[in-house]
Amino acid sequence: MKLTTTLAMALLCAGTAMAETVAISTPKTTLAYDATKGERLQYLYYGTRLSDTDLKATAETAEKTEGYQAFGTNCPFEPAIAAIHANGDASLDLRVDDVTTATQGDGSQLTTIKLKDTAYPFTVALNYLTYPDAEVIQTWSEITNGEGGPVTLEKFASAELPVRRGDVWLSSFYGTWGNEARLLEEPVTPGMKTVKNRDGVRNSQDAHGEVMISLDGKPQENHGRVIGAAVCYTGPYKISIDTQHDNWHRLFAGISEDMSAYKLEPGETFATPKVALSYSTEGKGGVSRNFHRWARRHALANGDKERKVLLNSWEGVYLDITEPAMDSMIKDVAAMGGELFVMDDGWFGDKYRRVKDNSSLGDWVTDRVKLPHGIQALVDKTNKAGISFGIWIEPEMANTVSELYEKHPDWVIKAPARDVATGRGSTQIVLDLGNPAVQDFVVGVVDTLMTKYPDINYIKWDANMDVKTMGSQYLTADRQSHTYIAYHRGLENALKRIRAKYPELTIQACASGGGRVNYGFLPYFDEFWTSDNTDALQRVYMQWGTSHFFPAIAMASHISASPNHQTGRRVPLKFRTDVAMSGRLGMELLPSQLSAQEREVCKKAIKEYKEIRPTVQFGDLYRLISPYEGKGVASLMYVNEAKDEAVCYWYRLENFVNGHYPTLVMAGLDPKATYRISEVNSLGRRPMQLEGKTFTGAYLMDHGVEMPENYEDASADERQFSSRVLKLTKI
């Protein structure tokens, strides 16, 4: 008898065959299959963890359906896998061949269900990875060609998950530049619903590779059964839900097969990216908290370390980098209590100087006109000021106006018979990461900087262009459909090499804003740039959507100027700081343009953020009032693990005379504990009525508190956008 995860496999009589029930379990959930040898894999159950008794009963009574469907033999529904054999046969008939389990060095458990074709030496290994301290199951497939010639993979999902039909709803996330991660919730109806990306470089610039499936009707935050699924991949992905005439919705997730047919050579194994699954009976919020905890422990670089408060130079000076401007910003951010200064785009170029955004990418040498004393002088100044130094790069890209392109035009993504396609500045191009020489170059960009300037603490890694013309100058003619896959294998290889050498270096994933918010990137990155749009009001909506799968510690959120550079909206500094303080706090402005009073406001906000930072960055998130519900306010809170401290954010999104705003009902607290409320980042005027008051956790979660609409002597701007941050301390 084999052992899978923490539950024994149950052996049940089924005629002359022995039905083998495989249970893959986290501390609170179970995913179960009937993996009878010689038969097709049958899905049984995914939900709350089953006892041995319930597992046996489920195996005997549950309605079964195929767990990983293959095209070509009795597959009336959408398949998970389709392939053309070496002899041209397009059929597959996959049957269970073996089941194994193993404990990994980190305590995780890997269960593998091996499927084998009945006519060909063609196998698919379905892998399931669980952790003893996380409510997430990662699953992926490994496809092996044992035939005498190449096999073409036409479809190759990482996972198929059947979901029983009922009042089932889908939560997904759409948008584009400056308006990322907008929440969409809709019932799942017959037919096909697809969420996908084909950008080639930035896979969350439009749709996101994560969805939630609510099984008990319209999604709720803290109630109801919900499944979360996230494609952990850096490249083009596809999530689809197929609903036909039977009792099941079928969720498929993995690499987008669009223009990505893969020729698998004899003896070669193709590993699909992981898909992370989580189940909760505590609504969408329960799934979010599961993903956030897993991310901080297993899926995010340096997820156990606090993130620094920084000033980024971009919206302050844009490309107009000069030594005096950098000196001034370093001095100002240090004076306000910041911990890191990041010099953004515009610092590089020799033969071609980076004066506009149409040249110099690829030429990663210091512009000595802009910075006559070089980067080291800036590093020395940050060290003297008691803060750290960071720098911007875009190593996957070049410009046609660059020394790199003059030397290596063959390094560029380009269709063989067509001119190179350009993007930003009419000259930007994408380097072909499928080429090992390009991988070496990308690694070298980071390695050169860190070797010359070992005190660099932070790198902002950008990627501002999609693959505009499909094709690789490195791949052979019969492998052009591998372009996307080869690019992202190469990128991952480069990132692994960088992380192996510089594990403590903080690296931000930026890609035209929030273009790389995906768990395929985050093992190599410490955080992501949520959006190029820094408007605080719009950020409430975008950060709300992003928070469904990604934790606050990874979500860069900056205080920007007013009027905002993207929307032109005038928002008071108090509101801007309060929104930014709900993520990884930073600044995106020119401090010298702030008044003395505004500098003091920022200084106070930074100081008080540092006091609540552990709870915000490592606490459990509870979304209380959604901005999408049209109630005129939005609210969320973080509660630390001990439940002895919480931080609650309240934002008024509209200003109506005699408007009616909901009571603030909290969540996640200890109902038996008593909490004292104090305001964080207050304006220093008359204390709010709640200041210093004490309530039980039960009262705050059952009844809630009334929030004042405004400060009593608020200015017109402050009345337009009112906000509060409350700290709850257990007494």
Image: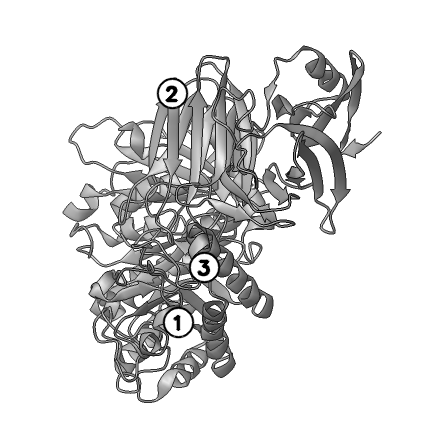
Residue mark closest to the camera, 2 vs 3: 3
Residue 724, horizontal then vertical, whole percent: 33, 43
Indicate which label's residue lies in the foreground, 2 or 1: 2
- Indicate the position of residue 22 as horizontal and vertical percent values: 72, 27
Q: Are marks 2 and 1 in contact (CB under 8 Å)?
A: no
- Between discs 3 and 1, the one toward the N terminus: 1
Q: Write the residue at 52% across / 52% down.
A: 614
Q: Residue furthest bottom?
A: 373
- At numbered mark 3, what does the secondary structure look like: helix, strand or loop? loop
Front residue (pair 179, 448): 448
84 to the left or right of 95: left
Q: In this view of the protein, can residue 470 be seen by the observer?
A: yes
Query: Between marks 2 and 1, how big is the CA–CA gap?
Result: 48 Å
The residue pinned by badge 2 equals 191
Relative to 403, is 105 above or below?
above
Q: Secondary structure at mark 2?
A: strand
| Residue at 52 percent of width and 34 percent of height | 82
How far apart are the two marked residues, 3 and 1, measured between alpha carbons?
37 Å
Amino acid type assigned to the residue bearing label 1 in the image: Ile
* Label 2 to label 3: alpha-carbon separation: 38 Å
First in residue order: circle 2 vs circle 1: 2
Depth check, front residue: 649 or 160? 160
**Mark 1 lies on residue:** 391
**How is this picture coloured?**
one colour
In this figure, which residue is indicated by the disc labeled 3? Answer: 476
**Which residue is the extreme one toward the front?**
87
Front position in the image: 600 or 183: 183
